[in-house]
Image: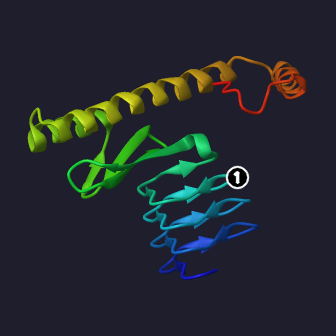
Amino acid sequence: FGSSCVSEYAHVLDNAKVFGNALISEDAQIYGDAEVLGNAQVYENAEVLGHTRLAGNARICEDAKLHSDEDYFCAQSFGSMGRTTTFFKTKEGWLINCGCFKGTVEQFRESVAKTHGDSLIAQEYLMIADIAELRIKRHQHRDSQEVYITDEELAKFKIKRCESEIPSNEITD
Protein backbone atom coordinates (compact mmCIF):
# COMPACT_ATOMS: atom_id res chain seq x y z
CA PHE A 1 0.00 0.00 0.00
CA GLY A 2 1.09 3.60 -0.47
CA SER A 3 4.71 4.04 -1.56
CA SER A 4 5.93 0.90 0.19
CA CYS A 5 8.38 -1.35 -1.63
CA VAL A 6 9.12 -5.08 -1.46
CA SER A 7 12.20 -5.96 -3.49
CA GLU A 8 14.88 -8.53 -4.24
CA TYR A 9 14.06 -11.87 -2.53
CA ALA A 10 11.90 -10.44 0.25
CA HIS A 11 8.50 -11.97 1.00
CA VAL A 12 5.27 -10.70 2.55
CA LEU A 13 3.05 -13.66 3.43
CA ASP A 14 -0.17 -14.63 5.24
CA ASN A 15 -2.11 -11.62 6.56
CA ALA A 16 0.98 -9.41 6.85
CA LYS A 17 0.75 -5.83 5.59
CA VAL A 18 3.34 -3.35 4.36
CA PHE A 19 2.31 0.25 3.77
CA GLY A 20 3.34 3.89 3.98
CA ASN A 21 6.95 4.32 2.82
CA ALA A 22 8.13 1.02 4.32
CA LEU A 23 10.91 -0.89 2.56
CA ILE A 24 11.28 -4.68 2.71
CA SER A 25 14.35 -5.97 0.85
CA GLU A 26 17.05 -8.59 0.42
CA ASP A 27 15.89 -11.85 2.09
CA ALA A 28 13.60 -10.27 4.69
CA GLN A 29 10.27 -11.92 5.48
CA ILE A 30 7.10 -10.39 6.91
CA TYR A 31 4.37 -12.87 7.85
CA GLY A 32 1.58 -13.79 10.22
CA ASP A 33 -0.42 -10.67 11.12
CA ALA A 34 2.65 -8.41 11.21
CA GLU A 35 2.49 -4.83 9.94
CA VAL A 36 5.37 -2.71 8.69
CA LEU A 37 4.52 0.93 8.11
CA GLY A 38 5.80 4.49 8.14
CA ASN A 39 9.41 4.72 7.01
CA ALA A 40 10.43 1.40 8.60
CA GLN A 41 12.97 -0.77 6.82
CA VAL A 42 13.41 -4.53 7.13
CA TYR A 43 16.35 -6.06 5.26
CA GLU A 44 19.05 -8.74 5.12
CA ASN A 45 17.64 -11.93 6.73
CA ALA A 46 15.31 -10.22 9.20
CA GLU A 47 11.89 -11.69 10.00
CA VAL A 48 8.87 -9.82 11.38
CA LEU A 49 5.99 -12.04 12.40
CA GLY A 50 3.11 -12.56 14.78
CA HIS A 51 1.26 -9.39 15.71
CA THR A 52 4.36 -7.18 15.55
CA ARG A 53 3.69 -3.63 14.39
CA LEU A 54 6.94 -2.10 13.15
CA ALA A 55 6.57 1.63 12.56
CA GLY A 56 8.31 5.00 12.42
CA ASN A 57 11.91 5.04 11.21
CA ALA A 58 12.87 1.62 12.63
CA ARG A 59 15.69 -0.21 10.84
CA ILE A 60 15.62 -3.99 11.37
CA CYS A 61 18.32 -6.16 9.79
CA GLU A 62 20.80 -9.03 10.18
CA ASP A 63 19.11 -12.14 11.62
CA ALA A 64 16.48 -10.21 13.58
CA LYS A 65 13.42 -12.23 14.47
CA LEU A 66 10.64 -10.07 15.88
CA HIS A 67 7.77 -12.07 17.36
CA SER A 68 6.12 -9.12 19.10
CA ASP A 69 6.41 -5.38 19.69
CA GLU A 70 8.61 -6.13 22.72
CA ASP A 71 11.35 -7.48 20.46
CA TYR A 72 12.39 -4.03 19.29
CA PHE A 73 12.29 -0.38 20.30
CA CYS A 74 13.48 2.93 18.89
CA ALA A 75 14.93 6.13 20.26
CA GLN A 76 14.23 8.95 17.83
CA SER A 77 15.96 12.28 17.18
CA PHE A 78 19.07 11.66 19.26
CA GLY A 79 22.73 12.27 18.62
CA SER A 80 24.55 14.58 16.28
CA MET A 81 22.30 13.81 13.28
CA GLY A 82 18.93 13.41 15.03
CA ARG A 83 18.78 9.79 13.91
CA THR A 84 16.53 6.97 14.95
CA THR A 85 18.44 4.39 16.96
CA THR A 86 16.80 0.96 16.69
CA PHE A 87 17.37 -1.85 19.20
CA PHE A 88 16.19 -5.29 18.11
CA LYS A 89 16.31 -8.95 19.04
CA THR A 90 18.20 -11.41 16.85
CA LYS A 91 18.74 -15.15 17.07
CA GLU A 92 22.01 -14.47 18.94
CA GLY A 93 20.97 -11.58 21.21
CA TRP A 94 20.24 -7.88 20.71
CA LEU A 95 21.73 -5.46 18.20
CA ILE A 96 21.67 -1.70 17.71
CA ASN A 97 21.33 0.00 14.34
CA CYS A 98 22.14 3.72 14.34
CA GLY A 99 23.22 5.42 11.13
CA CYS A 100 26.22 3.50 9.81
CA PHE A 101 26.73 1.72 13.16
CA LYS A 102 25.44 -1.80 13.68
CA GLY A 103 26.51 -3.90 16.68
CA THR A 104 25.96 -4.90 20.31
CA VAL A 105 25.31 -2.53 23.21
CA GLU A 106 28.94 -2.89 24.32
CA GLN A 107 30.21 -2.10 20.81
CA PHE A 108 27.81 0.87 20.67
CA ARG A 109 29.28 2.27 23.91
CA GLU A 110 32.81 1.89 22.53
CA SER A 111 31.87 3.58 19.25
CA VAL A 112 30.18 6.47 21.07
CA ALA A 113 33.25 7.03 23.28
CA LYS A 114 35.57 6.96 20.28
CA THR A 115 33.39 9.23 18.13
CA HIS A 116 31.95 11.68 20.68
CA GLY A 117 34.27 11.53 23.72
CA ASP A 118 32.48 12.90 26.80
CA SER A 119 30.29 15.42 24.98
CA LEU A 120 26.57 15.95 25.62
CA ILE A 121 25.83 13.93 22.51
CA ALA A 122 27.85 11.05 23.94
CA GLN A 123 25.92 11.33 27.20
CA GLU A 124 22.60 11.10 25.29
CA TYR A 125 23.75 8.01 23.41
CA LEU A 126 25.03 6.38 26.60
CA MET A 127 21.70 7.01 28.34
CA ILE A 128 19.98 5.28 25.43
CA ALA A 129 22.41 2.36 25.89
CA ASP A 130 21.49 2.25 29.61
CA ILE A 131 17.80 2.06 28.73
CA ALA A 132 18.58 -0.65 26.16
CA GLU A 133 20.38 -2.74 28.77
CA LEU A 134 17.47 -2.43 31.20
CA ARG A 135 14.98 -3.38 28.51
CA ILE A 136 17.11 -6.36 27.43
CA LYS A 137 17.44 -7.57 31.04
CA ARG A 138 13.69 -7.28 31.53
CA HIS A 139 13.13 -9.19 28.31
CA GLN A 140 15.61 -11.93 29.31
CA HIS A 141 14.07 -12.18 32.78
CA ARG A 142 10.62 -12.58 31.25
CA ASP A 143 11.88 -15.20 28.80
CA SER A 144 13.75 -17.17 31.46
CA GLN A 145 10.70 -17.24 33.74
CA GLU A 146 8.52 -18.63 30.99
CA VAL A 147 10.97 -21.48 30.44
CA TYR A 148 10.31 -22.82 33.95
CA ILE A 149 6.54 -22.41 34.05
CA THR A 150 4.23 -25.13 32.72
CA ASP A 151 1.73 -24.42 29.95
CA GLU A 152 -1.11 -24.98 32.44
CA GLU A 153 0.36 -22.48 34.93
CA LEU A 154 0.99 -19.98 32.16
CA ALA A 155 -2.60 -20.31 30.95
CA LYS A 156 -3.88 -19.63 34.48
CA PHE A 157 -1.65 -16.56 34.77
CA LYS A 158 -2.83 -15.16 31.44
CA ILE A 159 -6.47 -15.72 32.38
CA LYS A 160 -6.01 -14.04 35.78
CA ARG A 161 -4.18 -11.09 34.25
CA CYS A 162 -6.85 -10.57 31.60
CA GLU A 163 -9.68 -10.78 34.13
CA SER A 164 -8.13 -8.31 36.55
CA GLU A 165 -9.51 -4.82 36.46
CA ILE A 166 -6.68 -2.47 35.59
CA PRO A 167 -7.60 1.10 34.64
CA SER A 168 -6.62 1.77 31.04
CA ASN A 169 -4.49 4.77 32.03
CA GLU A 170 -2.39 2.81 34.54
CA ILE A 171 1.04 1.52 33.50
CA THR A 172 1.47 -2.11 34.52
CA ASP A 173 5.06 -2.92 33.46
Q: Residue at x 61, y 27 (%)?
A: 143
Q: Quadrant of residue 83?
A: bottom left
Looking at the picture, how far across and down is residue 87, in whole percent?
Answer: 42, 44
Specify whether residue 90 is in view.
no
Q: Residue at x 71, y 52 (%)?
A: 51
Dividing the image into 4 quarters, which one contains the C terminus? top right
Mark 1 is surrounded, within 10 Å at the Cα level, by few (under 14), some (14 to 19) or many (20 or more) other residues, namely: some
Up-down relation of residue 4 to residue 170 (above or below): below
Q: Quadrant of residue 62?
A: bottom left
Dividing the image into 4 quarters, which one contains the N terminus? bottom right
Q: Secondary structure at mark 1?
A: loop
Q: Front-most of 48 and 129?
A: 129
Left or right position of 68 against 44: right
Looking at the picture, how far across and down is residue 133, in whole percent?
Answer: 40, 28
Residue for badge 1: 50
Looking at the picture, how far across and down is residue 134, in whole percent?
Answer: 44, 25
Specify whether residue 154 is in view.
yes
Left or right position of 16 against 29: right
Up-down relation of residue 94 to residue 8 (above or below): above
Left or right position of 151 against 62: right
Amino acid type, callout 1: Gly
Q: Residue at x 86, y 29 (%)?
A: 162
Looking at the picture, how far across and down is residue 77, in whole percent?
Answer: 34, 52
Q: Residue at x 79, y 27 (%)?
A: 167
